[in-house]
Image: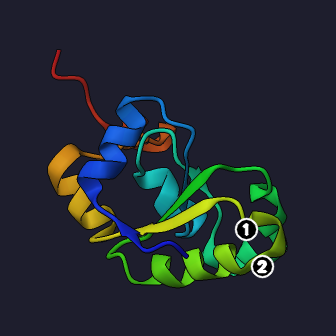
Amino acid sequence: MDGEITTDEVKELLETDADVRIVDIRDRPSFERSHIPGSENVPFHELTNRVEEFEGADRIVTVCPHGEASVQAARLIGSYEGIEDARVESMAGGLEKYGMKFGLVREEREEESADVESPF
């Protein structure tokens, strides 16, 4: 693991189309409710079985709700033999901080939108 990265730095990486993989380690339902645009979901409990998917990546940023579990995820990914050339970081403050500053993508579920009555 190469340390932590700020939410501002993550936002800048995304805005400049940098070659970075944002890995959200929450469970699938949490990810589907809200996430950083362009991020991918690899739940923490699946990391050890899927870490080889990150081979060849230049930069990987792990994210979680508060920036604590993502540190462990970054360490796990960074310890993998096929990742030694990648820069692996955890986003400090987590999705809570990122969401408060920049917002998150929120996916509306079909059944939720079907229950909403039109004001017209």
**Residues at badges 1 and 2 in contact (C-beta under 8 Å)?**
no
Q: Nearer the viewer, residue 55 or 49?
A: 55
Amino acid on which disc 1 is placed: Glu
**Residue 80 at what x, y percent from top left?**
77, 76
Give residue 84's mark. Answer: 1
Task: Name the residue rendered at 64%, 49% in the picture.
Answer: 58
Q: Quadrant of the C terminus?
A: top left
Asked if one can make out residue 112 in the rendered structure from this viewpoint, the answer is yes
User: Callout 1: helix, strand or loop?
Assistant: loop
Asked if one can make out residue 115 in the rendered structure from this viewpoint, the answer is no
Q: Give the left or right position of residue 5, taking residue 63 as reference.
A: left
User: Which of label 1 and label 2 is nearer to you?
Assistant: 1
Crowding near the residue tagged with mark 2, few <14, some 14–19, many ≥20 C-alpha atoms within 10 Å: few
Image quadrant where residue 13 sits: top left
Q: Give the left or right position of residue 88, taking residue 9 as reference.
A: right
Q: Give the left or right position of residue 80, taking residue 24 as reference.
A: right
In the picture of the structure, the residue carrying the numbered disc 2 is: 48
Crowding near the residue tagged with mark 1, few <14, some 14–19, many ≥20 C-alpha atoms within 10 Å: some
Task: Name the residue rendered at 70%, 50% in the picture.
Answer: 57
- What colouring style does the render use? rainbow
**Residue 40 at what x, y percent from top left?**
59, 50
Q: Give the mark, 1 or 2, whose residue is nearer the N terminus.
A: 2
